Image (cartoon, rainbow, N blue to C red):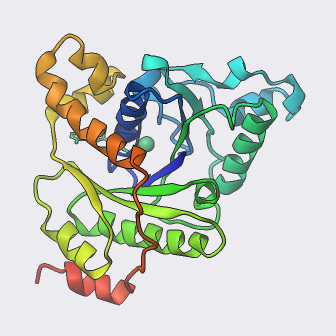
């Protein structure tokens, strides 16, 4: 199963991705997390460091794919989750979609692409141009991370539109929204009333989650020594279980920019 996690920058995609990858591994799946954000810190909580990116490695080998080995680009993270960072195009030049394409091509050459039960693409999604929607070409399910605010829901609506577009040629579904860093869900609720889609979980702001990211560890790793963190792991296990049940999901019907301003306006 291929998953693509999208959402506005800084909304919590990578934190959720790492913990969700691990939750899926805890359920016995062989998991690869593939960071597709030029920020290349997607897998930091799993490895504890910034691993070299595919683009850096390819550049150092003059794009000779035959000289790149699995161990150059695939790093084993905590709990046996394998980690890859695609990296980014040079700032102000190149295309994020090209980078994702090259990454998938390389993983196929290394016979790694079909080796996993789950590949999770962690993708920046403020603006989903053709390039940044590239992971949707491979995904069975898209997940969108949002908080209870206008900006993240506006981005979510754009991402939903991209899923609809891709669904014309590819069997992709939107599994749903994951609310993050919010105890309120009124705007999320308003949005899904206008654009129906499941809400898989809503995670409040937890200081322990923020600190786990700084420490470069998943909640599961920290919970090994602090059992009072177990309840946080349950959020991610719940999302994992919902996905493993192969939910129907939706092909979303995004709402217009004008409507989203109206629906989410506080005035
Ligand atoms: P993204 O990958 O979407 O850019 P990150 O996963 O890097 O976002 O998260 C951004 C920041 O928010 C990080 O410092 C992270 O620790 C923090 N964070 C994410 N989710 C939560 C949460 N539920 N509670 C508290 N802090 C969180
Ligand atoms: Mg990230």
Q: Residue at x 56, y 24 (%)?
A: 51
Above/below status of 140 relative to 230 = below
Q: Residue at x 80, y 24 (%)?
A: 68
- On screen, residue 41 versus residue 146, left or right, reads right
Assign the C terminus to one quadrant of the image.
bottom left
Above/below status of 74 relative to 119 = above
Q: How many marks?
A: 0
Query: Residue 183: horizontal and vertical position, in percent?
Result: 11, 52
Query: Where ligand 1 lies, by image quadrant?
Result: top left
- In this rendering, does residue 127 appear at all? yes
- On screen, residue 49 versus residue 23, left or right, reads right
Above/below status of 49 relative to 109 = above
Q: Residue at x 78, y 32 (%)?
A: 58
Relative depth, front residue between 46 and 250:
250
Relative depth, front residue between 162 and 233:
233
- On screen, residue 211 versus residue 105, left or right, reads left
Above/below status of 121 relative to 221 = below
Query: Residue 231: horizontal and vertical position, in percent?
Result: 15, 31
Query: Residue 46: horizontal and vertical position, in percent?
Result: 43, 24
Quarter where residue 27 is shown: top left
- In this rendering, does residue 93 appear at all? no
Residue lying farthest front? Answer: 245
Query: Residue 168: horizontal and vertical position, in percent?
Result: 61, 76
Residue lying farthest top? Answer: 225
Q: Residue at x 15, y 33 (%)?
A: 207
Assign the N terminus to one quadrant of the image.
top right
């Amino acid at each position: 199963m291929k998953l693509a996690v999208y959402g506005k920058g800084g909304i919590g995609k990578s934190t959720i991705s790492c913990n969700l990858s691990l939750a899926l591994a805890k359920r016995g799946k062989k998991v690869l997390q593939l960071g597709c954000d030029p920020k290349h810190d997607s897998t930091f909580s799993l490895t504890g460091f910034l691993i070299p990116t595919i683009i850096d490695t390819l550049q150092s080998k003059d794009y000779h794919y035959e000289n790149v080995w699995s161990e150059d680009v695939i790093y084993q993270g905590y709990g046996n989750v394998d980690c890859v960072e695609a990296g980014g195009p040079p700032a102000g030049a190149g295309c994020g979609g090209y980078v994702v394409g090259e990454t998938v091509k390389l993983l196929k050459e290394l016979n790694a692409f079909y080796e996993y039960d789950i590949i999770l693409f962690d993708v920046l999604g403020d603006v989903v141009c053709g390039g940044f929607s590239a992971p949707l070409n491979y995904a069975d399910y898209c997940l969108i991370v949002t908080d209870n605010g206008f900006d993240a829901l506006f981005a979510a609506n754009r991402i939903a539109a991209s899923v609809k577009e891709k669904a014309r040629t590819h069997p992709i579904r939107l599994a749903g929204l994951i609310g993050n860093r919010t105890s309120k869900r009124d705007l999320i609720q308003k949005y899904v009333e206008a654009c129906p889609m499941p809400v898989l979980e809503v995670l409040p702001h937890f200081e322990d989650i923020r600190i786990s990211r700084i420490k470069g560890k998943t909640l599961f790793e920290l919970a090994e020594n602090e059992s009072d963190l177990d309840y946080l792991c349950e959020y991610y296990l719940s999302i994992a279980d919902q996905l493993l049940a192969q939910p129907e999901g939706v092909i979303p019907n995004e709402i217009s920019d004008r409507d989203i301003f109206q629906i989410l306006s506080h005035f």
